[in-house]
Image (cartoon, rainbow, N blue to C red):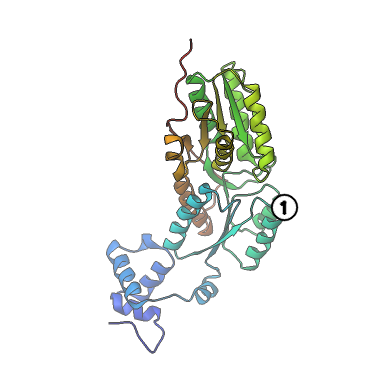
Amino acid sequence: MVKQENAKVTIYDVAREAGVSKTSVSRYLGGRFDELSTKTRKKIELAINKMEYRPNTMARGLKSNKSYLIGIIVADINNPYTTAILRGAEDICSQNGYNLMICNSDNNPEKERGYFDMLLSHRIDGLIIHTTGGNHDMLKQMQEQKTPIILLDRKVPDLEIDTVGLDNFQATSQAVNYLVGQNYERIAFFSEPASKVSTRHERRLSFQQTLMSHSHPSSGDVYEVNVDDLKDVESKLQHFLDDSKGVSRAILTANSVVLLKLILLLQEKKLSVPEDLAMMGFDNPDWSTIVYSGITTIEQPTYQIGVAAMEMILRRIDGHASPAQTMAYQAKLNIRKTTPFIQKP
């Protein structure tokens, strides 16, 4: 059978083409794959593709009292971390018959608040959010309305909400221990402001605590920078450079955005890495393997985090009831050319 030219393809047509029941096709479209054999799923998939069937999401939603929409609010869509998260989440979302509404807050609480209102008006079935930390009341309102919520990495105090992200204490401690073991006498931590963002706060605290456990003199070398103000970044970089003259020194950045800003400034200042100072950063953007013949990074399993967040929210949408869970992934240390071992005299 070929695609009907003069009539809209229906679920009955798909069932007939696949040689299965309408109920089986409905289960497939509803993502209830565990109720179907692999052979039946393949038949239905082939029939849908051959006939170019497009389910009527609105009618489907009215029947099931679902919108089949999941909202995701990201803090910075330009960040490579976000791109990988979205890929993982979207892959699982589409496999289960849902549509993803992507919103970018630009780390702006007011913009984020507007997206809350918009997503609520679309009757989303669930929300995944990389929160700015400024709209706890809206999250609480959604919780009270029984809308499933998953937090990406950034936690919210006083609210019991599922969270999926990195073990920031483990990851930062791993990075600092490595740099100390490489014999760097001064180590600075550069981050965007930590206020209201739990991820940044945890990494900063772990940086300081780990250095203190080594009785290392660098535990106070923390610089919070505004990445949108290059003069601010330059001023704080220069402060560290002046303050650490004559010793082996390294910079650890809290994310790849800060790392890139610092690299551009170091190039302007004609400073060499790792000859003048070592560099290491969170995240593992594609360009990190090229610049300086490879930058040492702390890599997050971002795609897997996106997958896990979507799988978790789909379980909540399906009615899975249990106390709020925190899923914390381990980081991977990628050792490259920017953090060589320093031989002591």
User: Is residue 221 among the parts visible in the rendering?
Assistant: no
Q: Residue 336 appears at what percent x and percent y?
A: 42, 32
Relative placement, left or right, of 38 versus 165 is left
Amino acid type shown at disc 1: Asp
Would you place residue 165 above or below residue 111 in this image? above
State whether residue 239 appears in this view.
Answer: yes
Instruction: In the rendered view, tell whether residue 140 sits above or below residue 67.
Output: above
Compared with 257, 172 (above or below) is above
Q: Residue at x 62, y 26 (%)?
A: 241
Q: Nearer the viewer, residue 61 or 134?
A: 134
Q: Mark 1, residues whose alpha carbon is within 10 Å: few (<14), some, or many (≥20)?
A: few
When asked about the image quadrant of residue 154, the answer is: top right
Query: For the view shown, which residue lies furthest in the bottom direction?
Result: 6
Please give left or right for residue 105 compared with residue 164 in the image.
Answer: right
Residue at the image point whose x is 32% and y is 75% from the top: 50
How many badges with numbers are in the image?
1
Q: Quadrant of the N terminus?
A: bottom left
Q: Nearer the viewer, residue 161 or 302?
A: 302
Percent across and percent down for residue 285 are 47, 44
Depth order, front residue of 213/42 = 213
Q: Nearer the viewer, residue 277 or 226?
A: 277
Residue at disc 1, secondary structure: helix
Left or right for 150, reference 284: right
Residue occupied by mark 1: 137
Give how far across and how far down residue 147 sits, in percent.
61, 58
Counting from the top left corner in percent of width and height, residue 36 is at: 34, 64
Give residue 23's quadrant in the image.
Answer: bottom left
Q: Farthest residue to the top: give it.
A: 345
Q: Which residue is painted at 47% across and 30% down in the image?
A: 338
